[in-house]
Amino acid sequence: MPTPRRRDSATTSPAGSPGDPIRHVIVLMLENRSFDQMLGCFQQIYPELDGIASRPPARQNADDDGNSYPQVAGAARVMAKDPNHDHPDVLQQLAGANGGFVRDFARTYPQSSSTDRAEIMKYHDLHALPALHALAENFTICDHWFSSLPGPTWPNRLFVHSGTSLGRVTMPEGIMNANLHWYDQPTTYDRLNERRIPWKIYFGDVPQSLVLVHQWAPRNMINYHHMQRFYEDVGGRESEFPAYVFIEPTYYPPGTNDDHPPHDVMDGERLIADVYNALRANEDLWRSTLLVILYDEHGGFYDHVSPPATVPPDHHQEEFAFDRLGVRVPALLVSPYAAKGVVNTVFDHTSLLKYLLDKWQLGSLGDRTAQARTFADKLVRAPRDDTPRTIPGPSTAGGVVAWAPRTQLSSHQAALFGLTHLLESMTGAQPYEIAARSSHVLTGPQSQIDVAVDRVEGFLAQQRDRFTQELARVAPRP
């Protein structure tokens, strides 16, 4: 696979300089899509973008039967089978001159059809994704943004919150085998707390960030809110909006909008459009905000750029050396201070942390973050006045893909269920109560989903109550 090209095409002032106009940073992180699949088509507009070549021959991947699958347009909205993206699978996908993405998928699903296998190589053509492509056409595309490690969702999301996964590249396995590690590393939110900089996490159903031990503190729980609250807050006074916001999509059906297969990508498009349009409608907030749209990892879909070498974040190397980045993912910088065009600098999720640490003079978040390249100098000095006031969401003309109950949870959904089991155990619930609920959830995926969401609500409510009680204890008496 070719090595990444480094080309820089923008100039500006660093985010930490005096008079920095960006006072708010919003991060929307979606799931499991490669750069080639989602944004590679933009080489049609930007020849300098490292994407889908317009001239033949098309890039190819083969299965073990010798069948070759080219990189062509026409990716499906819904892919029924979820490609594997665990650490060993990603290493197989990256092996060889052209990669083994199709081969790994075919070995995971030996009964899969040629149509299924072809989806691993397909990409969404220009304007097929109405919201993501509208933003890509109007703002900054980062075409060498890599996931932080060659592995699945959880470790990569740990990197975006803290700059490390404490040596882990594996996912928890099974709804009753949480396989949870004690992730007690310092986080971005700790560093913001130290500087008394306000932040919030808005979520759809079960926030994966609750796997971070420090987030359980009552003072942090009051910063977790449902997405409805985001739309209320984003319409309010600019001065009252948090400095840093992280958005977690809805991971469970119905209503999933995280882009994780087999979920309909148009639901993710609707979320992207809703977030942008709500932000853009508040002129004061818009003119002081950077929206970063990211994907945590590639989800097993083909990307042609070989991930470069990097440095480990710390001494934790229990499951991997952390000396190589993961597969390229879609990344956009959206702001009146983000120019139309392409930035070719090599970034990973710790580049976001580097930007935040420099911007607000936060404390350290490990060696990877310290050496990461920041995108601060890719933002323009003067605000643009030509940004779209709205972008389109999915058209209903294409029909709606009906949600059908699943026969089992995905590995990510099962891992989230295991996390909620742990959270419930910390609420003081009696062991027999937890056991009773656990046996109940085995009746089917929808029961598991209902219980998982209920557990999170109970945990958040209890921690908020504890915060209120702590305030009452320290409040001065009249």
Image (tube, rainbow, N blue to C red):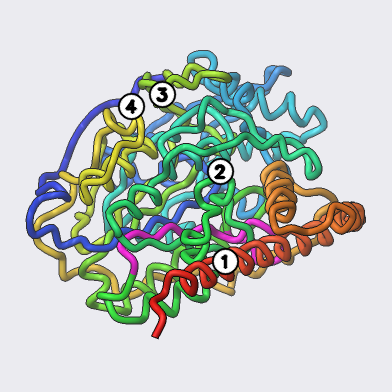
Q: Which residue is mark 2?
A: 32
Q: Quadrant of residue 110?
A: top right
Decide: marks 2, 1 in contact (CB < 8 A)?
no
Q: What amino acid is labelled 4 in the image?
A: Asp
- In three-dimensional space, the C-alpha distance between marks 3 and 2, rounded to whole angstroms, equals 26 Å
Which of pointers 4 and 2 indicates the residue nearer the eye?
4
**Residue at 65% across / 35% down in the picture?**
171
Do residues under tags 3 and 1 come within 8 Å of each other at their CB atoms?
Answer: no
Quadrant of the frame with the N terminus: top left
Q: How far across and down, in percent of the image, does residue 220 sit?
A: 47, 59
Q: Nearer the viewer, mark 4 or mark 1?
A: 1
Mark 2 secondary-structure assignment: loop
Q: Residues within 10 Å of mark 2 (few under 14, many from 20)?
A: many
Q: Earlier in the sequence, mark 2 or mark 1?
A: 2
Q: Are marks 4 and 3 in contact (CB under 8 Å)?
A: yes
Residue that appears at 25% across and 61% down: 335
Q: Is residue 170 magenta?
A: no
| Residue type of the residue flagged with mark 2 | Asn
Residue at the disc numbered 3 = 314
Nearest to viewer (mark 3 / mark 1): 1
Q: Amino acid at mark 1?
A: Arg
* Magenta segment: 242-257
Crowd around label 1: few <14 · some 14–19 · many ≥20 (10 Å): some
